[in-house]
């Protein structure tokens, strides 16, 4: 767990390239070596998306936060595993958990469904809360990871990672969503519909 938490601390001045490399390293680690456990039920990661904002990597789709690395961060789109974040110092981000697979094979697809699955019916003392746990070395997996564009995010960055064998429908996202130009944004602010 210490190694994972260290990787969740991204240098506040990291370059775009360094951040992309860190995302790749974290994706491989989460999919192959870690799982989510809630009340003894094990869940595998099936799809995650990365979001990080700093002066060199201005990802405006990232929810602002000030939080320590490795904590759950809830927001209107779902739940993130947080990077070390300090909005007052200009760096923040997290890993959105988009899809998971329950040990019985049930796939929970969609970030809000993930929240409902792993954070529903938690005792008020928090003793049965969802936790990320490292697998025993003989339980490590060798997942065929694929990456693509984030879901419904206007960005040219391929920051979404998924288990290629379980979620083949994601492969359809081969091109980035349409990115509005400045005149589109002005029209949208004035209440006009976006061009298609």
Image (cartoon, grey):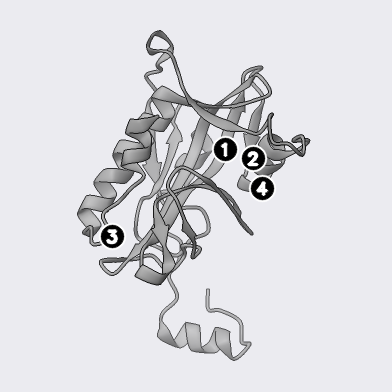
**Mark 2 or mark 1, whichever is nearer to me:** 2
- Badge 3 vs badge 1, beta-carbon distance below 8 Å: no
Measure how far apart labels 4 and 2 are at the Cα level.
Answer: 5 Å
Q: Which mark lies nearer to you, 3 or 2?
A: 3
Image mark for residue 112: 4
Rendering coords of residue 129 (x, y %): 66, 33
Q: Is residue 99 left or right of residue 153?
A: right
Q: Earlier in the sequence, mark 3 or mark 1?
A: 3
- Residue with the most extreme top position: 138
Looking at the image, is mark 2 or mark 1 earlier in the sequence?
A: 1
Q: Position of residue 19 (x, y in %)?
A: 27, 52
Circle 1 is placed at which residue position? 99
Q: How many marks?
A: 4
Image point (50%, 38%), residue name: 47
As displayed, is residue 80 above or below residue 55?
above
Pick the residue in front: 142 or 5.
5
86 versus 124 height, above or below: below
Is label 3 in a helix, a strand or a loop?
A: loop
Q: Earlier in the sequence, mark 1 or mark 4?
A: 1
Inter-mark Cα distance, 3 to 1 = 28 Å
**Which residue does the image show at 77% across and 34% down from the upper left?**
123
Disc 1/disc 4 C-alpha distance (Å): 9 Å
Check if mark 2's residue and mark 1's residue have beta carbons within 8 Å. yes
Residue furthest out toward the front: 125
């Amino acid at each position: 767990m210490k190694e994972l938490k260290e990787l969740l601390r991204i240098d506040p001045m990291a370059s775009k390239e360094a951040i992309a490399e860190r995302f790749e390293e974290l994706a491989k680690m989460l999919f192959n070596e870690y799982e989510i456990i809630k009340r003894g039920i094990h869940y595998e990661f099936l799809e995650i998306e990365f979001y990080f904002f700093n002066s060199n990597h201005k990802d405006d789709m990232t929810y602002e936060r000030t939080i320590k690395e490795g904590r759950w961060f809830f927001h209107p789109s779902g739940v993130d595993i947080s990077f070390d974040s300090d909005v007052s110092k200009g760096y923040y981000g997290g890993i959105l958990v988009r899809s998971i697979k329950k040990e019985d094979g049930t796939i929970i697809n969609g970030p809000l469904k993930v929240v409902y699955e792993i954070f529903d019916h938690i005792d008020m003392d928090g003793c049965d809360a969802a936790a990320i746990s490292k697998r025993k070395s003989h339980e490590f997996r060798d997942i065929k990871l694929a990456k693509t564009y984030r879901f419904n995010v206007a960005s040219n960055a391929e920051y979404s990672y998924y288990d290629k064998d379980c979620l083949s429908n994601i492969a359809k996202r081969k091109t980035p969503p349409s990115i509005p130009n400045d005149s589109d944004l002005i029209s949208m602010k004035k209440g006009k519909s976006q061009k298609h």
